[in-house]
Image (spheres, rainbow, N blue to C red):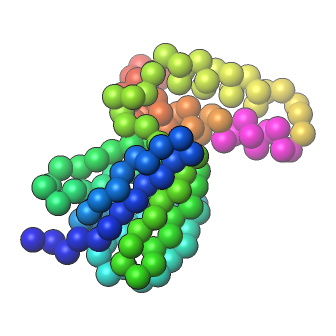
Amino acid sequence: MAALFHLRVLAAERTFFDGECESLTVPASDGELGILAHHSNLVAAVVPGALRARLPDGRFAEAAVSGGLLKVEDGDVLLLVDSVERPEEIDAERARRAEARAREALLQKRSTQEYRGAQAHLARALNRLKLSGGSQGR
């Protein structure tokens, strides 16, 4: 049996997961970050992407996460994100509309801050579509 660690995934509106975990993969600013039991202490920025956690029973839990923060301290892992959604919770049509709005906003010549905001919205929409399986044909 693989070594376990305690994982808590908290979003602004809910506790997504609170329990034991074998491994965790999260999207970080410089690529995917993998966490196993006994990982050294760490604080890292999380970017929109797919979270993947291997549970003690061998199942994998996947979710689309927004930006946030990951903290590993004394064998416990805490992931704080603005939003987290399981693939079956994602409304693909809504995500497509959000993608279209974000792409339109990118075409508008606005401030740097507005441009970066539009880029973040686009990244989140594309991630949600990818994880939900709603991006076929694109």
Any part of residue 12 in sight:
yes
What's the residue at 89%, 34% (across, down)?
110
**Residue 11 spot, x, y in % from top left:** 51, 47
Compared with 71, 91 (above or below) is above
Compared across the picture, whether 23 is left or right of 121 comes to left
Compared with 108, 113 (above or below) is below
Compared across the picture, whether 103 is left or right of 86 comes to right
**Residue 64 spot, x, y in % from top left:** 44, 41
What's the residue at 36%, 69% (across, down)?
35
Check the picture and name the quadrant holding the N terminus: bottom left
**Residue 138 spot, x, y in % from top left:** 47, 23
What's the residue at 56%, 61% (across, down)?
69
Tell me if residue 132 is in the magenta stretch.
Answer: no
Compared across the picture, whether 121 is left or right of 16 comes to right
Q: Main secondary structure of the magenta part?
A: helix
Q: Residue reaching furthest left? A: 1
- In the image, 45 versus 78, the foreground residue is 78
- In the image, 19 versus 44, the foreground residue is 19
Tell me if residue 113 is in the magenta stretch.
Answer: yes
**Residue 113 spot, x, y in % from top left:** 84, 44
What's the residue at 69%, 39% (across, down)?
119
Any part of residue 50 in sight:
no
How many badges with numbers are in the image?
Answer: 0
Q: Quadrant of residue 125?
A: top right
Which span is picked out in magenta? Answer: 112-120
Compared with 89, 75 (above or below) is below
Q: Quadrant of residue 22?
A: bottom left
Compared across the picture, whether 46 is left or right of 77 comes to right
